[in-house]
Every structure is written in structure tokens, then in C-alpha cells.
């Protein structure tokens, strides 16, 4: 079973790399993984029992195409910290009350430690929900706009 999942992930990664090589946006692949924790408004950590030891059996998924405010010491001002905490609380509440959470994987983020994708909570995109609530802005790698203004 674990071997089959591992082979499927390698195959999916190969498809993503092939799509990127030809200049296409990769299609998202859906998984139903157990949530470990909400890191912040746009990053959720999931169980990944298929990852071989000694690597940590978890994967962090950053919501593709959004920027949420930073919280705590990473915030540039008190307003950003408060907004960042609201975004985190919003995501935590959605996941805590959800009956179905799916992970839509798309690609690796630019830092390589997280995966980019979207989280579908009871059929609704976390990306869209964050933007609709004013807790995130669209972001595709350009210079970020301050949340302090």
C-alpha cells in the first residue's frame, strides 16, 4: 500500500515537472490527508505517513496564489499582526468545523520546503474564502504590498 502511494506520488511529480518543462500550468492533484495543524492563514500541515523514515512524516501546504498578513514577530506593524492572527483563526475555524478537507497539490514553492496547492474545505476553496473575507490578497511572486498602510 505505502509502496503504491509512493509510486503514485513519484508519477504525479514527474507529470508536474513535464508540464512545467512545456510551459503549462500543472493540474492539481487531490488528496484526503489528516490535518496536523494550521501554521498560519495560508499554510496547513498534514500527516504524510507515506514519507520514509527518518524524514518527518508531514507535509506543509501553502495556499497557492495568496498572501496573508504575517502574525507575531514577523509582522511589520500591530495592524498586520492582528490581521495575520485573524487569518489564522479563520482557517483554524473552517478546518475545525469541516466534514471534508481535501488537499489540491500543484507544485513546490520557491523555497522548496513546502508544497503549493489549495485546501478544499467542504467543497469550498480556502484560497477563495480568504480573499472573499479580506484576509488575503492575490499573490503570484511579485513584490508584496504592505499590510500596514
Image (cartoon, rainbow, N blue to C red):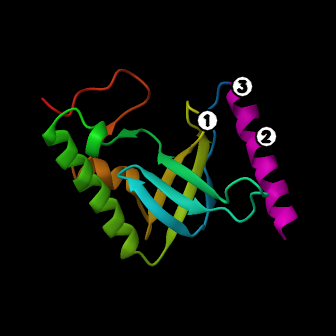
Figure check: 19 above or below 96:
above
Side of 67 where 37 appears, left or right: right
Which residue is tagged 1?
112
Q: Nearest to the eye among marks 1 and 3: give it.
A: 1
> Circle 3 sits in a helix, a strand or a loop, which is it?
loop
Tell me the quadrant of the picture where the N terminus can be found. Answer: bottom right
Q: Which residues are magenta?
A: 1-22
- For mark 2, does the 10 Å Cα neighbourhood hold few (<14), some (14 to 19), or many (20 or more) residues? few
At x 27%, y 45%, the residue is: 72
Side of 145 where 94 appears, left or right: right
| Nearer-N-terminus badge (1/2) | 2
Question: How far apart are labels 1 and 2 at the CA level?
Answer: 16 Å
Q: In the image shown, does 148 or 130 lie closer to the viewer? A: 148
x and y percentages locating residue 94 in the rendered image: 34, 68
Residue 14 numbered mark, or none: 2
x and y percentages locating residue 68 in the rendered image: 31, 43
> Circle 2 sits in a helix, a strand or a loop, which is it?
helix
x and y percentages locating residue 95 in the rendered image: 40, 69
Amino acid at each position: 500500500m505505502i509502496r503504491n502511494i509512493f509510486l503514485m506520488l513519484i508519477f504525479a511529480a514527474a507529470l508536474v515537472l513535464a508540464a512545467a518543462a512545456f510551459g503549462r500550468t500543472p493540474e492539481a492533484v487531490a488528496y484526503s490527508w489528516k490535518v496536523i495543524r494550521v501554521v498560519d492563514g495560508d499554510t496547513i500541515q498534514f500527516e504524510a505517513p507515506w514519507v520514509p523514515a527518518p524524514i518527518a512524516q508531514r507535509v506543509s501546504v501553502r495556499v497557492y496564489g495568496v498572501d496573508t498578513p504575517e502574525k507575531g514577530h514577523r509582522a511589520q506593524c500591530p495592524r498586520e499582526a492582528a490581521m495575520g492572527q485573524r487569518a489564522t483563526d479563520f482557517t483554524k475555524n473552517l478546518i475545525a468545523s469541516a466534514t471534508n478537507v481535501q488537499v489540491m497539490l500543484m507544485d513546490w514553492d520557491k523555497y522548496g520546503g513546502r508544497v503549493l496547492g489549495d485546501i478544499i474545505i467542504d467543497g469550498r476553496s480556502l484560497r477563495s474564502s480568504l480573499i472573499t473575507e479580506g484576509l488575503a490578497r492575490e499573490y503570484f511572486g511579485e513584490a508584496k504590498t504592505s499590510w500596514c498602510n
